[in-house]
Amino acid sequence: MLPGFKTCRSKSGGKMRHFKLVLFVFSIFNLFFIHEAHAYINAGSGSYFIQIIIAVILGGIFALKLLWGKIKAIFKIFFKRK
């Protein structure tokens, strides 16, 4: 069963579950099979995408810094010297 798709216990007999599944499949289909988009990308969009990439990289480094002690402890357990 897909996450977020719970069986519906109402009188509709699972129609809501079927609707959610159809909506999910349709959304994935639209996401991957769009042939052309009539859209305009302005000059600020490139700057925004660069900001997102930098934020993801710095966020990952910060998360690694916060969890570094736990990561070292796990490796010490697996690679203990005898």
Image: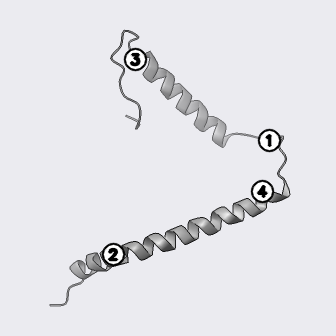
**From the viewer's perspective, is 69 left or right of 12?**
left
Label whose residue precedes the other's in the sequence (4 or 1) = 1
Q: Residue furthest top?
A: 11
> Would you say the residues marked 2 and 3 are in contact, meaning their CB atoms lie under 8 Å apart?
no
Q: Is residue 78 above or below residue 37?
A: below
Residue at the spot of label 3: 14
Of tags 4 and 2, which is closer to the observer? 4
Mark before the other along the chain sequence, 2 or 3 = 3
In which quadrant will I find the N terminus?
top left
Q: Which residue is denoted by mark 2 in the rendering?
A: 71
Q: CA distance from mark 3 to mark 4?
A: 43 Å
Quadrant position of the C terminus in the picture: bottom left
Q: Secondary structure at mark 3?
A: loop
Residue 46 in percent (x, y) is at 77, 61
Earlier residue among tags 1 and 3 = 3
Inspect the image, locate mark 3, and give the three-letter code of the amino acid beneath it: Gly
Discs 2/1, front? 2
**Label 1 Cα neighbours within 10 Å, binned few <14 / some 14-19 / many ≥20:** few
